[in-house]
Amino acid sequence: MNRTLWIGSAASLGLAVTGLIANHHSFAQSSSEADSANFLTPTANDQLLLRNTFQNLEVVARSLVYFPQMERAIAANNPEIRTAESVFADAEVRLTGVGPLQIGMTLEAATDALGLPLVPLGSSLGGDCAYYQPDAVSQALGLMVVDNRVIRIDVWPGSTLKTVSGVHIGSTGKALQATYPGQIEAQPNAYTQGEFLTLVPQDPEFSLYRMVFETDSHDQIVQYRAGQFPAVTWPDGCV
């Protein structure tokens, strides 16, 4: 939507500038045909054309200031846009999904649940495992899909999503251990010089699921993921 508005404004400005150039050319031509005594005195018609052109430019420039309000107004009156912007507003990451998205959903069901297109990001050499990303600028998420079912959700740097217990990117590994006492398994992380901290649920109902948090050398969580075991533990995703 931003792109559309700016393209429209650029087109308006371009038309206005084109009109200015054309008017200036007309003025220069009419001046060259006038006698030398009247060369520096534009006609009333030329003055009117120039004044109208500058006024049009001023109107277009002023309208740019109101584009953010226009965008919000359009979104407020468009249910599809409103849903796309708000689907993650109050969402929390859990062992079995995030917001309306459930681990185990088909790709089509996940698309319907989120109300957003899922953009393919790449797949394994065999093509049996692929990543998709919800087409939303508000969150950086990756969905691992195997045999057309979502089996893992990756929360990447830049996302503000929290777990149901309030853990998020930027939290410390120490805080994570305190939040889930006795449920965290730690392993060295050669990629970040930190650790892989795996949440192993105590409830037998969730025995097939895990959350894996990656910390850096300063003990800060840089990304995390939730999903089915063992796929959720694969550090390289579909590779």
Image: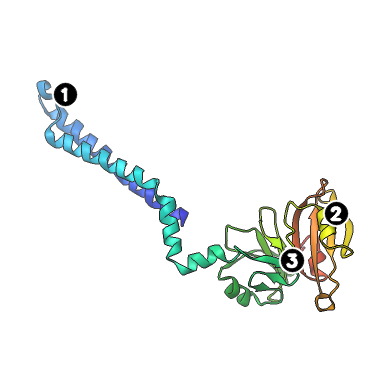
Disc 3: CA contacts within 10 A as few (<14), some (14-19) or many (>=20): few
Asked which colour scheme the image uses, the reply is rainbow
For the residues labelled 2 and 3, the Cα–Cα distance comes to: 28 Å
Q: Residue at x 70, y 57 (%)?
A: 156
52 left or right, relative to 146: left
For the residues labelled 3 and 1, the Cα–Cα distance comes to: 74 Å
For the residues labelled 2 and 1, the Cα–Cα distance comes to: 78 Å
Query: What is the secondary structure assignment of the residue under circle 3?
Result: loop
Determine contact: label 3, label 1, CB under 8 Å.
no
| First-in-chain label (3 vs 1) | 1
Q: Which residue is mark 3?
A: 125
Q: Residue 222 placed where, x, y %?
A: 75, 52
The answer to whether one can see residue 214 in this image is yes
Q: Nearer the viewer, mark 2 or mark 1?
A: 2
Query: What is the secondary structure assignment of the residue under circle 1?
Result: loop
Kind of residue at badge 2: Glu
Q: Which residue is mark 1?
A: 40
Quarter residue 96 falls in: bottom right
Q: Quadrant of the C terminus?
A: bottom right
Q: Which residue is mark 2?
A: 195
